[in-house]
Structure formats: structure tokens, C-alpha cells
Image (tube, rainbow, N blue to C red):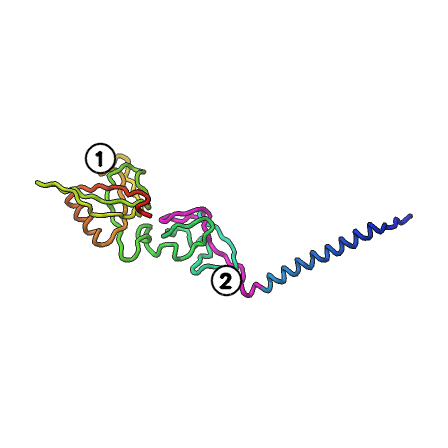
């Protein structure tokens, strides 16, 4: 059996390959050591629920809206939720962008989907929209006008720049049967405005005007 001798070039390439391999191993090992050294300051990986898609205020959360990511405990935001099951069925009180962590401050407290959106000191009040379905949606802002009859009819603005919390679609045929004008609006109002709206609803015909987007900015 004849043994083939390595040429000087082959020996040089072998030495270079061994040196490169040892260098790569040292770099990887050093990087791992750095990560291990940083672990006490950044903390262990912690589960955090984030939005899987862009979500808007008032959304009732379902499993498909959310996912779990793991971040170092030092970077977990206060009030973060760690389990998707803990968030399902909750109502968002603020918009949430895809990938943004879900925290306790972003979901409503105990209560229904409307009550959870009402800040302290305000009220939700329902008025007939007087417009076809689909014209107004949650987040729009409207003025409510009341037209009083009698010998001297007049129209007064009883609510201005009111936020629409949600839209209640009327059953099919209600528009024609009741003349209510389609869906009803759940508006965010002060207690004083709620009293004016209640009085106007009892003694006047209500109608709404829709504010432009730049007026709500």
C-alpha cells in the first residue's frame, strides 16, 4: 500500500482550516458566555401575550387575535398578560398594533362590552341614528340635534362632538316599521349631556350630524 504524501500547500490549507475552526469555536463560546453573563441583568425568558393583528378599541378578543412571545423578564411591560386564555373575551379600551404587548391597562375592567369602555365620570347613552346602516361606525364623532314642535318649532344642539362607542344594528324591517331611521348609536357623554339627551328624546325628534375626521383629531 502506497501512502500519499501531503504537499506543503495541502498542509498549509489543513493548518488554516484548523485555525479557522478553533477561532469560530472560540467566538461562539465567547458569545454564549456573554449572553450567560447578561442573563442576571435581563432576566429569564418570560411569556408575554401580544397582538397577532392590528386591533381596534372595543374589540372583544378571540384566540386568533393573539399570540405568545418570550422576552427577557427585564423588558416585560408592567401589567403584561402571560396567557392567551386569560385575555380571551376581554374588551380592548385602546387600539393595539400587531406585535404590541397586551397589558391590563389595555383591557376593560369587570362589566359588559359597553361598560368596560366607559371612563370614570362619563356615561353611555343610546340614541337613534336616523341614518342607514353602515354610515356611522365606532370611533366616529357626531352632534345630536333635537327638533321641538309646538306653536314655535325650533331645533337645538343637545350634544356636540360625541364619540360613538358602538353601533346597534336594528332588526331587518325596523327602519320601515318604526321610522327610527336604522341603527342606534351608543354615545360617550357626560352626565349633564345624558340629561339633555333624555329630555330631548322624550319631547323632540332627534337627528345627528357626522363630524369630519379632522375635527376628531
What is the quadrant of residue 29 in the picture? Answer: bottom right
The residue located at (42%, 56%) in the rendering is 103
Mark 1 Cα-neighbour bin, 10 Å: few <14, some 14–19, many ≥20: few
- Answer whether residue 62 is magenta in the image: yes
Q: Nearer the viewer, residue 137 or 169?
A: 137
Residue farthest to the right, as pictured:
1
Answer whether labels 2 and 1 touch (C-beta < 8 Å).
Answer: no
Asked if the stretch drawn in magenta spans residue 8, the answer is: no
- Residue on which disc 1 sits: 177
Magenta highlight range: 38-63
Question: What residue is drawn where x is 21% and y is 54%?
Answer: 192
Q: Which residue is mark 2?
A: 74
Q: Is residue 163 above or below residue 34?
A: above
Instruction: Tell me: residue 122, above or below residue 204.
Output: below
Tell me residue 182's x, y (percent): 26, 38
Question: Is 122 positioned to the left or the right of 95 in the image?
Answer: left
Residue that appears at 44% across and 57% down: 81
- Name the residue nearer the viewer: 139 or 67: 139
Tell me residue 127's x, y (percent). Answer: 24, 45
Of residue 205 and residue 112, the one placed in the foreground of this image is: 205
Q: Nearer the viewer, mark 2 or mark 1?
A: 2
Q: Residue at x 51, y 53 (%)?
A: 69
Q: Is residue 139 left or right of residue 40?
A: left
Quarter assignment of residue 119: bottom left
User: From the viewer's perspective, is residue 181 above or below residue 192?
Assistant: above
Local SS, label 2? helix
Q: Where does residue 144 sit, x and y in percent of width and height?
A: 22, 44
Given residues 14 and 85, the one toward you in this image is 14
Is residue 2 found left or right of 46 in the rendered image? right
Distance Cα–Cα, label 2 vs label 1: 60 Å
Q: Residue furthest front?
A: 214
Element marked by disc 1: helix
Amino acid at each position: 500500500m502506497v501512502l500519499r504524501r501531503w504537499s506543503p500547500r495541502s498542509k498549509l490549507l489543513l493548518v488554516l482550516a484548523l485555525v479557522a475552526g478553533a477561532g469560530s469555536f472560540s467566538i461562539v463560546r465567547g458569545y454564549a458566555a456573554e449572553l450567560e453573563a447578561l442573563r442576571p441583568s435581563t432576566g429569564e425568558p418570560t411569556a408575554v401575550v401580544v397582538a397577532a393583528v392590528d386591533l381596534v378599541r372595543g374589540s372583544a378578543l378571540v384566540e386568533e387575535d393573539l399570540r405568545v412571545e418570550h422576552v427577557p423578564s427585564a423588558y416585560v411591560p408592567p401589567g403584561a398578560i402571560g396567557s392567551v386564555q386569560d385575555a380571551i373575551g376581554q374588551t380592548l379600551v385602546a387600539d393595539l398594533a400587531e406585535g404590541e404587548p397586551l397589558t391590563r391597562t389595555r383591557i376593560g375592567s369587570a362589566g359588559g362590552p359597553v361598560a368596560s369602555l366607559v371612563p370614570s365620570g362619563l356615561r353611555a347613552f343610546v340614541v337613534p341614528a336616523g341614518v342607514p346602516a353602515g354610515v356611522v361606525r365606532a370611533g366616529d364623532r357626531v352632534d345630536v340635534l333635537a327638533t321641538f314642535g309646538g306653536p314655535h318649532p325650533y331645533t337645538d344642539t343637545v350634544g356636540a362632538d360625541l364619540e360613538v362607542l358602538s353601533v346597534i344594528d336594528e332588526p331587518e324591517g325596523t327602519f320601515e316599521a318604526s321610522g327610527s331611521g336604522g341603527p342606534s348609536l351608543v354615545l360617550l357623554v357626560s352626565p349633564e349631556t345624558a340629561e339633555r339627551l333624555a329630555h330631548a328624546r322624550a319631547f323632540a325628534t332627534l337627528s345627528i350630524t357626522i363630524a369630519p375626521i379632522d375635527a376628531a383629531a
